[in-house]
Image (cartoon, coloured by chain):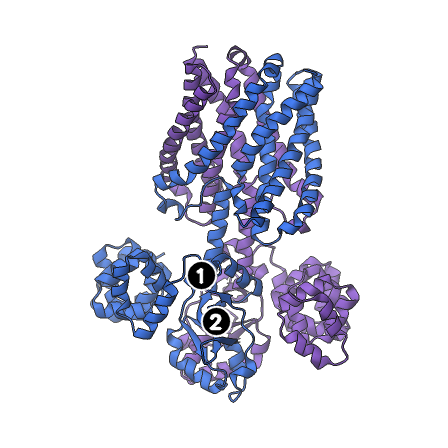
Chain colours: A purple, B blue
Amino acid sequence: MIELKQLIQMMEKKDKLVFYDYLESYRPIDLAECVEQMSRTQQLTFMERIPVLLAAEVLEHVEPLLQYQILIHLQEKTTALVLNEMSGDVVVDMMLAIHRNQAARMLNLLPDDYREKLQMLMSFPEETAGSLATVDYIAARSMWTVEQTLKHIRKVGRDAEITAYIYVIGAKGELLGVASLKSIILAEPHVQLWEIIVEAVSVPAMMEQEEAADVLSRYDWVALPVVDTQNRLIGVITVDDLIDVMQEEATEDIQKLGGSQPLENSYFKTSVFQLYKKRIVWLLILFVAEAYTGNVLRHYEDTLSEVITLAFFIPLLIGTGGNTGTQTVSTLVRALAMGEVRFRDLYKVIRKEMAAGIMTGISIAIIAYARAWILGVEYDVGLVVGITALAIVLWASLVAAVLPLILHKLKADPAVVSGPFITTLVDGTGLIIYFTVARIVLSL
Amino acid sequence: MIELKQLIQMMEKKDKLVFYDYLESYRPIDLAECVEQMSRTQQLTFMERIPVLLAAEVLEHVEPLLQYQILIHLQEKTTALVLNEMSGDVVVDMMLAIHRNQAARMLNLLPDDYREKLQMLMSFPEETAGSLATVDYIAARSMWTVEQTLKHIRKVGRDAEITAYIYVIGAKGELLGVASLKSIILAEPHVQLWEIIVEAVSVPAMMEQEEAADVLSRYDWVALPVVDTQNRLIGVITVDDLIDVMQEEATEDIQKLGGSQPLENSYFKTSVFQLYKKRIVWLLILFVAEAYTGNVLRHYEDTLSEVITLAFFIPLLIGTGGNTGTQTVSTLVRALAMGEVRFRDLYKVIRKEMAAGIMTGISIAIIAYARAWILGVEYDVGLVVGITALAIVLWASLVAAVLPLILHKLKADPAVVSGPFITTLVDGTGLIIYFTVARIVLSL
């Protein structure tokens, strides 16, 4: 970590070279964290004093709105230079975060062709592959020799974000193939690119970002070209952006499985009111659904007053049902997200969960019976508790196995079937199972 | 997807070139999926007939044990060639999956220096950075010129897995810095490497793989060098392996939050008995803990028989407490895993959760009171239900906010505090809150 105070002291030194030397040992992301803690004046002084390339890299690591606040207050010449050096996908994110008039003014600082490319990327909806793409890649033509290509790379490579691959495009901009920088270096200078390119795995611009992440991780590449409906190369997604997507998706799934709507920001950047809004929706839905347990209990009021000891086991039995359901649902929602399980596996999943359910159910039933015995209730109440435990575990496993797969099939989000959702569902139905078993066994 | 039948037909063609042409359009991972479905004889014929480089790439995508089964049955010459072309980290995984005598026999097929490097990687415990590293990187010396380096790359590059970076090492093998292939191509031929290298972000071999993944994703690099305690370069981890680590860690957290021990394999590769073992541990612990609710209810048996309507609201109130706790705990466990929240934020987290808890608690209390009114119970029982709802929501939020942070501080896994764990904890304690409020308000 960098000392903020020291950084500011160094920044105010007259001798720029001493300051540059000092900066050398730090990485852009670390400097960015310092910038976030500076006052606005300090931020502007810092940005004006550091080299343009570094300024662009540092800015890439701060929040879009702060990027804008800093860029708009710099001298216009600096703004134009920094903006031009920043990675295309980051600039697009910033433009989309600010007002369209502000964005238009910013875009005007850029060269015409670059501005047009960015405007096209800005047209893709959020969470699509297109919205993640950057235009800072290197394109080449299939007739070029390796020597020509290397010359071209030396000319344009400094501004490119992606240099691990060279994309070969045709006359209309269509993607013909890809050559890794490695393969270019290994090839003889006179070889033409069409001799060494391989077919590129590309994704359509409108594909969901989550799917694009799956494609990338399947083929172990570090960049993924994005094409339009005519197979024209629009941009390239880098692996670090797709890593962020994977992490975000996992975070969302975890929050949804916990019975909350996913937060749009990190924990501390989410206000209390937003936290409330994200949570109260499901809490209220589940509360209303759970209220149904009151009706079930009132329905069995006579049975309950006759054998009040039955009440002792209500939380235990429905709690265990909820726990079993939560275990199953979290395993299956994740397996669906990772593509390990599909709807066509429904029968296999049910068979597996029922087999595991019988084993856990019997284990729990034995302990439940023992528990009833320890609590000193009548023998037949113990029997009711044991049988109910087995039945509830099986029921919870079945519901938790089937619902996520059906939702997935219906193109709905399986993570809607959260732990709290299953718990609530099993609570009401579990009580019905309990009292039905009780009435039969105790002949009430 | 490739047609397995067609592939086998093509493979049996006399003319190798026709077969090679046919193979061209498929990627190794797709071919690997076909190989998994072939009979052993077909697998061996396929491997002997395809080019060695492709054979190595295809094998990299099948399970370690199948890799071994195929390699051991090929002609020894082919085995040696294929093994030598396979990526170092994959070979290490395979060696660790088979018996040490079998591994020793395999390793003997490799050149001495390569074997020694692999044996060193094999010595690192599972889930460490060292165990993920591959030795197929390109190293260079700081005095080399760009021209010399490019020549070296042309000589050894074909076998290297990582070519995006060239690692510059000193006389004792210590890591001095790193130069991207891009920076080498952009530099003048006579420039020496020490002029263009930058300090490398490296990780120690014994670092946990999860932490290494965090480092990589922070700095947006595509490969991460691994060093020993003397800063000597041991190997390099590629981004695709760290993506797998991130996905595995998220899967484990989701399963743990669902109240199950994490599975070691994917869903369908986990046997029913393993599924049972992973689930029953927590189910039994929670069952025993939940059994405590029986004691609480028996303790308040008199209150309960006096006002039997109180029983109607038991599942509703403790269910809502469990739901609130599950929401909070899943948000915080993920925030801890992503490094957004630390123990030193404890006070901030409590304040935030209490503020959100008061808002959700009051909302729920109002609905709870209305629910009691609809169910037609006495006015004061409704009051008890409303007050309890607020108290339980606050209590659940507090416990769910504090416990994961404390576990994290104690270097234990915060995901142990799963949804079912919090639900169980809140069930027993929630009942005590309920009956305490009832006794006070109803003056029992």
Residue at screen point 34% across, 42% down? B271
In the image, what residue type sits under mark 1?
Answer: Asp
Q: Which residue is mark 2?
A: B230
User: Foreground: B151 or B226?
Assistant: B226
The answer for how far apart the CA atoms under marks 1 and 2 are is 25 Å
Which chain is mark 1 on? B
The chain holding disc 2 is: B
**In the image, is B402 to the left or to the right of A395?**
right
Q: Are the residues under marks 1 and 2 on the same chain?
A: yes
Labels 1 and 2: the sequence-earlier one: 2
Q: Is residue A384 left or right of residue A40?
A: left
Occupied quadrant, residue A192 = bottom left
Q: Nearer the viewer, mark 1 or mark 2?
A: 2
Crowd rating for badge 2 (residues with CA inside 10 Å; few <14, some 14–19, many 20+):
few
Q: How many numbered marks does the figure carry?
A: 2
Nearer the observer, B392 or B67: B392
Q: Is residue A406 visible?
A: no
- Marks 1 and 2 in Cβ contact (< 8 Å): no
Where residue B91 appears, x then y in whole percent? Answer: 34, 64
Query: In what element is the residue under mark 1?
Result: helix
Can residue B33 be seen at all in this image of the molecule?
yes
Q: Is residue A109 left or right of residue A315?
A: right
Judged from the image, the secondary structure of the residue bearing numbered disc 2 is loop
- Give percent across and percent down for residue A157: 56, 77
Q: Which mark is residue B241?
A: 1
Q: Is residue B15 above or below residue A428?
A: below
| Front-lying residue, B152 or A200 | B152
Report the amino acid beneath label 2: Gln
Question: Which class describes the residues within 10 Å of circle 1: few (<14), some (14-19), or many (20+)?
Answer: some
- The correct choice, above or below, for B422 with respect to B343 in the image is above
